[in-house]
Image: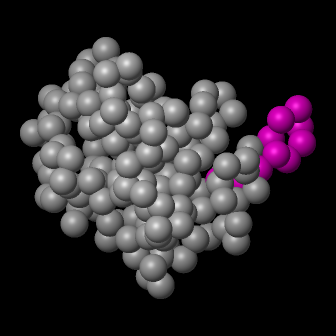
Amino acid sequence: SFPGGKCDPADQDVVHTALRETQEELGLAVPEEHVWGLLRPVYDPQKATVVPVLAGVGPLDPQSLRPNSEEVDEVFALPLAHLLQTQNQGYTHFCQRGHFRYTLPVFLHGPHRVWGLTAVITEFALQLLAPGTYQPRLAGLSWPGAEGLAHPQQPLVSPCQASSTSGLNKGL
């Protein structure tokens, strides 16, 4: 999953929450001016509404990070080019009590599988970063809160009303 968490009272907005959580969880200080914007908030039925914050960090060696062992088990990076290759894209069906509920994207990388809300956020980011190149494998996500990207005129910073997650672009 991406770094993220609930807003602290000291956080001005979701951008500051994402930057703070990235520093706390990965030991990575991302300057506010590297924030590109927000993706549309998505609803996670088990947790809360999540506001993905997209930032550019340039080439990044995962070995240079200092992950917090209490919050992070493993760190790996997926370059944009890898995510755009169709052989690394898939989907998974979720069922409840033996009945189909919804389908979400999955991104594959060796032993790693990016799925769930992290894959949904990754898909939204790919649609924004590689329009015309990235073709979602699902025509539409039939999942509450997965309507797509925020309108381009949406303000960069929104009030701190939800959890935030950092969509750090590690491969540009």
Q: Where in the figure is residue 95, as x and y percent of width and height?
A: 80, 41
Of 106 and 1, the residue lying toward us: 1
Query: Residue shown at 69%/33% (left/top)?
Result: 45
- Residue 152, above or below 109: below
Query: Residue shown at 34%/42% (left/top)?
Result: 15
Query: Residue shown at 63%/37% (left/top)?
Result: 44
Residue 8 quadrant: top left
Q: Where in the figure is residue 87, as x and y percent of width and height?
A: 48, 69
Chosen colour scheme? one colour
Q: Where in the figure is residue 76, as x and y percent of width and height?
A: 28, 44
Of 76 and 21, the residue lying toward us: 21
Of 4 and 89, the residue lying toward us: 4
Any magenta on residue 78? no
- Residue 66, above or below 134: above
Residue 22 quadrant: top left
* Quadrant (top left, top right, bottom left, bottom right) of the C terminus: bottom left
Say left or right for 65 vs 115: left
Question: Can residue 123 be seen at all in this image of the molecule?
Answer: no
Magenta residues, as a range? 95-104
Say left or right for 9 vs 162: left
Is the stretch drawn in magenta largely helix, strand or loop? strand
Residue 64 quadrant: top left
Any magenta on residue 97? yes
